[in-house]
């Protein structure tokens, strides 16, 4: 099966293969779908790449039901690996929830799994694989549940509009496993592709040198609003498409269209903007809200928004554009018939303004300082300082602190502000129905979203899923979750099997959601009633954050046994193995004076490192160090380790360039020429991201070393430096050509000067 489409003539309606085995028994319709999950090759960029298609298509087919139906979905796994299907946002029995090793065992290759559950709600939802990184390969689709025609909450003028499901996603030609591995190794390849490296050279040129210095002084790596570089953004599988008619009716001026928009992306947030006027938001995460008019909205990963747009004039097709938050990529659909009415692309982010703001927020201890602003509900977009289109930012603007940044953001959302742009935030959402919880006791739980970019660790209360206990709750009780985001990235937190109400000032009409985006330093409060037995996953929906362990499991007291999990111990072990996964990193310089190698195998806390140098002249000898250590603390600045050091130099080799090599700086015999010894030490990351390494070896010899790796001088040029008390030193440059290849040169006190290439994986 070959899927080859980038620009689509029509907005593909993602036709549903409805094997309408609609069995009418006692007025209950059973609606059956068959989903054939199969490997495929796609050409989204022109180059072939592996993907997974369902019924031959990406995205997966839209599944449509009416409230009151019974869903019967046959998943036929034609892959060579196991799979699963999660019904996002649905209220269903736990064993139908589709989380492998938690609510069911994986669907093995060549087998069929039947999901069967009653449809107890209505609204725009979606479904996706919950196995590994399959979602990134195409396993996402719209899941629409219609209101019954006699629903007392039927909204004439909204619920009877022509409706089109639209699922947004992103595509990379890189294998998702490789993306995941690269993120864990703090590679800046994605930043190079996105031109968001924020190097010293660029800082100097743009007048932000002090900002850059201060940023590294506070031990931060260059920050971006998203981690991954994608090749394409897709809307129903297309980069651009046209919507000229709905249900066979040609769109004409005055018509309104309801778009059921899902963000099925793995890690991208999208800005939605429309060239034909205001966007009216009528539902969020499948739940109706009072209509609210905005100029734009950001849709977080896994959220859904139902929006209504209109066609103002004849002979026009109006662009609806979805742009990634980092503004590197976008996709559009043109709604209507006629001349294309374009919307201006969003300008490039002012990264250094963002850096300046982050500097203001970051304390020296690695914690964030909100300066008493008590932020929540996306009302103040802390990224607003990075948006050059905001008035006052087009020139040089110095938002030197949080308050300044927030002022910009607030001006931005207020309608009488310098720029008259209304941006949606959660405080503007008001449920159309009373959303108060049943009477009963409340249990309050507090969570801090935690993590660090340097090793790509994402956690809750500094624990990943496999390190944390399950959270025991009682059926019938009300839960109140107070969530603070203490990390530097935003996280779309998703709860399985339940909707929660978001306390947003709308009192008993607080909106109901299943996914809430929480920006850095924000605190949000959610409430839900524990009304369905089972093991329910609560996690960040950024795929690579989830796979790194950013989640918790809610488990009910005294709940019935899940018949699909026969071996609980094995299932738990497999589930926990996901965030315990080891990531490999390898680099080796092949230069005229020798070979320098570095191999690293690490997970959330542990890291095994092996370094070696082989001199090309026999007198230069061979040395290697292997050590195992554990990162401590949320910021992971401490790294105690133990290992083995092997150092061999031919007798009578040349003296060190500093002369006498008998003694180190402590006056101890350096024993550089020939040593085989155990070592133990501790590495601490200092300001300027300098690593201070103090160690002692089996002979009682001390060594203290300072080093800095990969300091970005320009977009592609990196600088490395090292100095230690054994009177060894090194300095070098690396120019990054491709993902795996660099030109490199360095001077080493042992091996002298050399130049060549460096391979890194
Ligand atoms: Cu996250």
Image: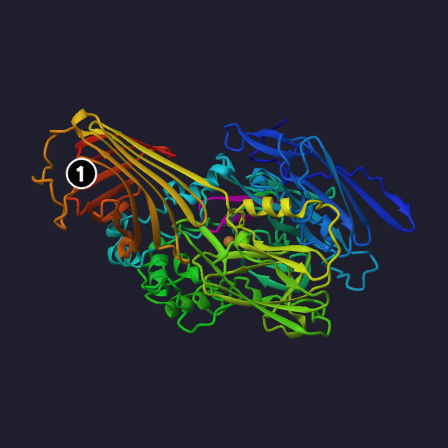
Q: Which residue of the protein is positioned furthest toward the right in this rendering?
A: 26
Q: What element carries label 1?
A: loop
In the rendered image, residue 48 lying in the magenta stretch gets the answer no
Can the viewer see residue 574? yes
Residue 85 falls in image quadrant:
top right
Q: Is residue 566 left or right of residue 372?
A: right
Residue 77: image x %, image y %? 69, 34
| Label 1 environment density (alpha carbons within 10 Å; few <14, some 14–19, many ≥20) | some
Identify the residue at image location x=18%, y=37%: 748
Location of the N terminus by quadrant is top right
Q: Is residue 710 above or below residue 504?
A: above
What residue is disc 1 on? 672
- The structure residue drawn at horizontal position 39% and vertical position 72%, both measured from the top left corner, is 371
Q: Is residue 31 above or below residue 586?
A: below
Q: Viewer-proximal residue, 741 or 103?
A: 103
User: x%, y% of residue 340?
Assistant: 55, 44
> On the rendered image, what quadrant is the C terminus found in?
top left
Tell which of 553 and 184 is nearer to you. 553
Residue 162 can be seen in this image:
no
Number of callouts in the render? 1
Q: Position of residue 135 (x, y in %)?
A: 59, 42
SS assignment for the magenta stretch, majority? strand
The answer to if 327 sits in the magenta stretch is: yes
Bounds of the magenta segment: 320-335
Q: Where is residue 142 in the image (x, y as percent from the top left)?
A: 67, 46
Which of the two residues, 583 or 432, is positioned nearer the viewer here?
583
């Amino acid at each position: 099966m070959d899927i080859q489409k980038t620009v689509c003539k029509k907005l593909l309606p993602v036709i549903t293969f409805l094997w309408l085995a609609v069995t009418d028994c006692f007025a209950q319709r059973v609606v059956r779908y068959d989903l054939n999950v199969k490997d495929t090759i796609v050409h989204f960029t022109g180059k072939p790449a592996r993907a997974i298609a369902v019924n031959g298509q990406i995205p997966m087919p839209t599944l449509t039901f009416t409230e009151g139906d019974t869903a019967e979905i046959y998943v036929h796994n034609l892959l060579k690996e196991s799979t699963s299907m999660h019904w996002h946002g649905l209220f269903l029995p736990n064993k139908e929830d589709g989380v492998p090793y938690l609510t069911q065992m994986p669907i093995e290759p060549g087998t069929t799994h039947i999901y069967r559950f009653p449809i107890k709600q209505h609204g725009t939802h979606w479904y996706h694989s919950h196995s590994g990184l399959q979602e990134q390969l195409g396993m996402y689709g719209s899941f629409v549940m219609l209101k019954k025609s006699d629903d007392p909450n039927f909204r004439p003028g909204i619920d009877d509009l022509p409706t089109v499901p639209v699922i947004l996603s992103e595509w990379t030609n890189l294998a998702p496993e490789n993306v995941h591995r690269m993120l864990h190794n703090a590679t800046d390849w994605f930043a190079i592709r996105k031109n968001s490296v924020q190097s010293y050279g660029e800082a100097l040129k743009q007048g932000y040198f002090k900002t850059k210095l201060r940023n590294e002084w506070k031990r931060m790596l260059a920050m971006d609003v998203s981690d991954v570089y994608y090749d394409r953004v897709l809307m129903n599988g297309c980069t651009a498409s046209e919507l000229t008619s709905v249900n066979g009716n040609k769109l004409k001026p005055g018509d309104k269209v309801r778009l059921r928009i899902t963000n099925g992306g793995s890690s991208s947030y999208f800005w939605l903007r429309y060239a034909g006027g205001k966007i009216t938001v009528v539902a969020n995460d499948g739940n109706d809200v009072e209509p609210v008019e905005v100029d734009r909205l950001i849709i977080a990963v896994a959220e859904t928004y139902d929006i209504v747009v209109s066609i103002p004039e004849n002979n026009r097709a109006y662009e609806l554009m979805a742009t990634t938050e980092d503004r590197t990529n976008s996709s559009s659909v043109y709604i209507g018939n006629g001349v294309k009415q374009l919307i201006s692309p969003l300008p490039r982010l002012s990264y250094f303004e963002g850096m300046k703001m982050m500097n203001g927020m970051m304390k020296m201890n690695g914690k964030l300082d909100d300066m008493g602003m008590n932020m929540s509900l996306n009302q103040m977009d802390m990224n607003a300082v990075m948006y050059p289109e905001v008035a006052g930012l087009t020139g040089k603007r110095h938002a030197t602190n949080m308050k300044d940044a927030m002022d910009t953001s607030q001006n931005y959302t207020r309608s009488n502000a310098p720029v008259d742009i209304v941006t949606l935030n959660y405080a503007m959402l008001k449920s159309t129905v009373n959303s108060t919880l049943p009477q009963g006791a409340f249990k309050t739980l507090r969570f801090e979203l935690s993590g660090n970019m340097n090793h790509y660790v994402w956690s809750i209360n500094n624990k990943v899923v496999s390190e944390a206990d399950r959270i025991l709750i009682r059926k019938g009780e009300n839960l109140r979750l107070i969530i603070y985001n203490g990390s530097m990235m935003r996280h779309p937190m998703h709860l399985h099997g339940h909707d929660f109400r978001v306390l947003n000032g709308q009192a008993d009409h607080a909106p109901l959601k299943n996914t809430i985006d929480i920006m850095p330093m924000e605190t949000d409060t959610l409430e839900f009633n524990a009304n369905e037995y089972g093991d329910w996953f609560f996690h960040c929906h950024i795929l690579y954050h989830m796979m790194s362990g950013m989640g918790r499991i809610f488990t009910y007291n005294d709940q019935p046994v899940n018949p699909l999990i026969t071996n609980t111990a094995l299932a738990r072990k497999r589930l926990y193995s996901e965030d315990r996964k080891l990531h490999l990193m390898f680099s080796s310089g092949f230069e005229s004076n020798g070979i320098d190698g570095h191999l690293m195998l690490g997970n959330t806390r542990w890291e095994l490192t092996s370094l070696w140098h082989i001199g090309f002249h026999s007198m230069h000898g061979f040395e290697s160090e292997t050590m195992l250590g554990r990162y401590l603390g949320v910021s992971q600045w401490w790294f105690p380790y133990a290992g083995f050091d092997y150092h061999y130099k031919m007798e009578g080799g040349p003296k060190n360039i500093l002369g006498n090599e008998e003694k180190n700086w402590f006056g101890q015999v350096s024993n550089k020429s020939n040593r085989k010894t155990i070592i133990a030490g501790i590495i601490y990351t200092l300001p300027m991201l300098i690593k201070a390494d103090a160690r002692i070896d089996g002979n009682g010899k001390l060594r203290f070393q300072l080093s800095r790796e990969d300091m970005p001088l320009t977009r592609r040029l990196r600088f490395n430096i090292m100095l230690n008390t054994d009177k060894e030193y090194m300095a070098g440059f690396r120019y990054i050509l491709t993902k795996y290849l660099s030109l490199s040169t360095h001077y080493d006190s042992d091996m002298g000067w050399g130049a060549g290439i460096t391979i890194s994986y």
